[in-house]
Image: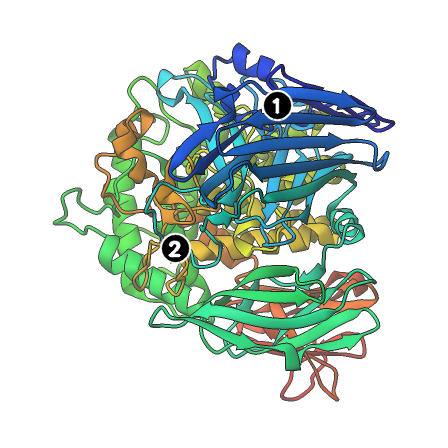
Amino acid sequence: MENQNYMIEFCPNGNVSKLILKNDPYKMNWVVDENYLEIVHYDDKDKLFGNFSITINDKKYTNHETQGKLSESAGLTTVTYDFDEVAVMFHYDLSKSEDSLRWTIQLVNRTSSEVYISDFSVWSSFAYVMYRMNDLNMQTRHSTAVFPSISKSFTKLACVRRSNTAPHLGIYQLNGETNSVGTYCEYKNLFFENASPSLDGILFHQLVFAGGYPEDFTNSDWIYCKDGFSMKANETKDWQFVLEAFDDQEDFYEVGKKHGHPVYNFEPLAITNQPYDFSFSLPSNRSLKDAYVEYKSENDVVKVQNIMSTIHKNESGYQATLLFEEPSELKVSIELDNGKMDSVIVNVMKPIQNIIANRAKYVSNVLYSGPDGETPFSYTPISNQGESLGKLSFVLKKNLLGTTDQSEVQKVEESCVNYIRPKWFINGDFTKPAFLYGDFYRCMDFEYIGHVFYLLSQFDQSILKYNSPDTYLEWAADVFTLRVNPDLHHTERGKEEAQMLGTFFLYINGLLDELKRRGLTDKYDEINALWSDIATNVANESNSFKAAVTEHFYDNAGFGPAAGALASSGHIEAAKKYGELLIANIGFSNDFRAQNPDRWWEALSYMIHSLWGGLTAAATLKVYEKLHDPRYLKAAYRATVGILYCYDTDAKATDKRLTTGEAASTYSVAGPNVNRPDLSRNRFGQSTFYRDGGIFSKLFNKEEETSDWDMGEELAAYLDGFGQKTFLYVENNQIKVINGCIEHTEQGLLIHSYAPYPTEYHFYDVDSHFISKNGELVSEILYADGRFQLVKNEQEVG
């Protein structure tokens, strides 16, 4: 079936096997391809686009139990599945418009009595595929990220091609009510088979109209509905969606507005007792009927507050300045004059300084083993992977920015001398890495070790108790050299991984500056040459996106650092190419938790991963600081807010509640997470998969291990970026702020920073900047007459 812009093919049983946009130069199939499932031996044909399951009066049916009946007419294909109580019909209509596909799902009660539908889920399996092939053309041009916006009346999915090359594909709800969007993951992981790349997989998405979870399932998710519904005798219900191409994020919402969807301008984070600007526009034929916010109070009671009186209509839409006193996930809902409902989900947090200080205390006082621990001088949980050392870098970075706690710094130093060095290096020799993974080691581990040593070298001698700052700087240089010099490795894997980019893009320039400043010329020359060669090689190969491959076939742990490193090293054109992969990787949604960098393997679901989400955000911010394209600034901030949710001790819509200073490395955005329903919209650590066996039982010792083993590096990165910096930019002829809020005063714009250590304000559009002297904290600043001014004495500073 086809029209001017679309070509659709069906399997014999009625599910969609091919969906192609004719103006797409790459002719991507936008739905999961049955042939690929056969190639990789995935038994998931029951999850192809248009398959479904339904539970009627406690009896479950799927479309595999009956043969679908296909009927075709001009521009319209109907697939009908008949069961005893109901008929399920799918209408695929290309006749309404050349620009779109109308997809209608009908449910008909065929009986003369009421029936109860406790579960009804339809697979909308777009091509969210990480291919089992080292073919970057397939990974970037024939694979899509899927970013869900779940709403009672206005659910939509943004399917963004991973190269960020338009056309992309959007799906917009026109009629009916949607409860949620769930996912199921099929994957293969060869991590312990000394294979690199080692991981591939597919994420299948389903639209949930009723239930979606096992019987009697409950969790703390109060935001999204899990209910079923009743159907009267002979009643028909229908859900209608339209599929239409879009060019970019802004166009995605404009297409939605054309189909009746509200468009919002909101930031994902509000800080308690700070003004929060919220605005939206409606289609011209619609008006606002009501508006309210919902949140959970400290005693877990859902409270509702009407905000209709605070919303003002102007020529561009509706606007409100809100103030929230209690920290919690917050649901802002609007009702239109036609009865349809829409919502956005923001997070309200206490000032982030609280999280940073409490986390550093927790790491230092609870996780540190000390000399008498089971593994002396280590920080629990124990792991062979260098990611587990990120929490040490975070503690050091926090102490460099704020008031120094000598005890916290010296515990890290003890660990470096007595635990890290002898564990990862044979006899402490930085040229002889220990084979901690059986018959191989990971070069990636060394970049985390180098970061800890480098940060330790920034402290004054009076703070340290074992060695001088210069000694730790030399250690950092030696470990970094091992990380990036393939000639120092005798294994093929070691030589290959040494040439991959990694988290060291966060600190390489600082390391070089310090080596030069302290007169360590030989080490400076060696590292500078190695770094220059790596950056140049990645830049020269940017057309093929080679650095997107890490241990996995396609990975933001590859193209994130690549983009950040290329920006930091001045390879601007190459940074632009990799930067597009970042834009396609960071979600946009009505829910702050679904605006994270796209990843799946730690949760087997669409997820927030604290470490790589945070590092991807940090790389995106570095690209913004070179290119000054606000897409990167906004994407970096969206991603960062999601990462902070992994540390949020006031979150109430997740079963995993965090005590003061605790953290959880992973948040499963999808609900349901069909692989592990208990993880749906929940925070956890990967050790929770220990009981599922496979590689997880090799990675972890027990299911009860703490949930933060690989956390910390992203907070160190955050403290280098949004932890200190607030940004102004111009959009639609208005000055907007990122990582803060604006008050309009008679003197000018008063900028309140959300940074825990606010020392920098930047307005790249007009080349105006403020950096405080000697790291002095400046929590608010005035912007007037084209320059930043200190509030107290209105001294010109930028």
In the drawing, what numbered circle is on residue 654?
A: 2
Q: Nearer the viewer, residue 788 or 705?
A: 705
The kind of residue tagged 2 is Thr
Residue at (60%, 63%) from the top-left corner? 725
In the drawing, what numbered circle is on residue 588?
A: none
Image quadrant holding the C terminus, namely bottom right
Can residue 519 be seen in the rendering of this structure? no
Image quadrant holding the N terminus, namely top right
Going from N to C along the chain, the mark reached first, 1 or 2, is 1
Residue at (31%, 64%) from the top-left corner? 660
307 to the left or right of 607: right
Q: How many marks?
A: 2
Q: Is residue 419 above or below residue 490?
A: below
Q: Secondary structure at mark 2?
A: loop
The kind of residue tagged 1 is Asn
Q: Nearer the viewer, residue 673 or 604?
A: 673
Q: Is residue 441 above or below residue 650?
A: above
* 3D distance between C-alphas at marks 1 and 2: 34 Å
Residue at (53%, 11%) from the top-left corner? 38
| Residue 620: image location, x then y, percent | 63, 47
Q: Is residue 508 above or below residue 310?
A: above
Q: Secondary structure at mark 1?
A: loop
401 to the left or right of 561: left
| Residue 629: image location, x then y, percent | 75, 51
Q: Is residue 578 above or below residue 436?
A: below
Can residue 206 be seen in the rendering of this structure? yes
Q: Nearer the viewer, residue 83 or 511?
A: 83
Query: What residue sits right under mark 1 in the picture?
Result: 15
| Residue 165: image location, x then y, percent | 75, 34
Residue at (65%, 68%) from the top-left corner? 761
